[in-house]
Image: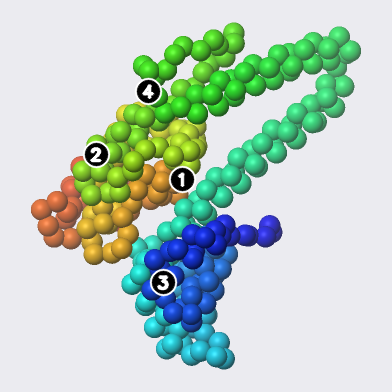
Amino acid sequence: MKTIWIRFFPQDWLLSNIRRRLNHFDRGVYFDLLCLLYTSPMPGYACETCGDDLRFLTMNELALDLADGHAGTDVVMDALNRLAKYGGICEDEVGIHNPRAVEEGTRASDQRRKSAAKASKAAKARWMPQACSKHSPKQCSKDATSNAEQSRVEQSRVELEAEDTNTISSPSETHPKSEAPGVTVIRIPYQEIYQAYQDTCGQAGLTIHRGLSDTMKRQIKARWNQKIKAGNYRSDDLEFWLRYFQLVVKCPFLCGTTGTNFRADLMWLTGRENIDKVLGLRYLPKGAGADKPKSSEDFKHFAEMMGLNMPEEVH
């Protein structure tokens, strides 16, 4: 198992508001808590493995884990309550977590998947010559030429896609690029997806961004290339994102209107695991209210919005 490290910027910590509000003991509890959250089975959340399942910890259990001979559970609990008050930790329908740890855990998970795919591709290429040795020299030469041509086309496609990634201009604003023969250039509509979020989710109270960051573009690109299927739509289609954001604004928890400190943003909504949760209708409210689904028919309306199957618990 690889060592898990934490990105830490001393200047940001020294100037942060939460540091000024915490006493020295609270800061020590905060650092221990971050170490616990970053190394948990579900990075960012306070949880532990229980067989094949995850069990999410309560505040009392966290206090027991962090207490030691110098400070009892009650003192640590007071520190945790202050951390919750100042935004050091939050609690949602899943469990207690630190938003930044969740974000970085999602990013690290994506990078691990990419590295695994790249390693698998390299292994296949490395063993290909041995498979070719079973054929005649003429056939081997023909296969080698074909593989070289395929690699050249793939490299051209990757370079053109990477060039397209560095801009957030819409396709109509992008100048035509010279394309290699046989290459299909993938153009991801970053600006249209970003604008759909701003227009739909921004008006519903979600975090409004001043622009697309490189990290946001990387996450959008990852989700686009994964071709996540949701009923009649896939994530490599702009229509998927338009309907996805319409579904998001129907979830009061994601809009920050349920009294918690949590409010979703574009980074959170483009996380791989978070998309699965939203598409699974996990955050749709259950209870009274004009806009809250009270029956299976209400859930069916939202499910049809994305062409989804209804969750079993509301059939």
Q: Reading the chain from its start, which is encountered first: label 2 or label 3?
A: 3
- Disc 3 marks which amino acid? Arg
Secondary structure category for the residue under label 2:
helix
Of mark 4 and mark 2, the one earlier in the sequence is 4
Pair 1/3: label in front: 3
Residue count near mark 1 (Cα–Cα under 10 Å), binned few <14, some 14–19, many ≥20: some
Could you tell me residue 211's position as x and y percent?
37, 38
Residue furthest left as drawn = 290
Instruction: State how far apart marks 2 and 3 are (Cα).
Output: 36 Å
Q: CA distance from mark 4 to mark 2?
A: 18 Å
Figure quadrant of residue 35:
bottom right
N-term-proximal mark, 1 vs 4: 4
Front-most of 239 and 179?
A: 179
Vertical relation: 250 (above or below) 304: below
Marks 4 and 3, the one that precedes in the sequence:
3
Residue with the mark numbered 2: 200
Does any portion of residue 293 appear in the rendered image?
yes
Q: Which residue is mark 1?
A: 272
In this rendering, the label closer to the viewer, 2 or 3: 3
Q: Which residue is mark 4?
A: 170
Nearer the camera: disc 4 or disc 3: 3
- Mark 1 is on which residue type? Arg
Q: Percent position (x, y) of residue 233?
A: 36, 31
Residue 80 appears in which quarter of the rendering? bottom left
- Is 20 placed above or below 178 here? below
Residue marked by disc 3: 20
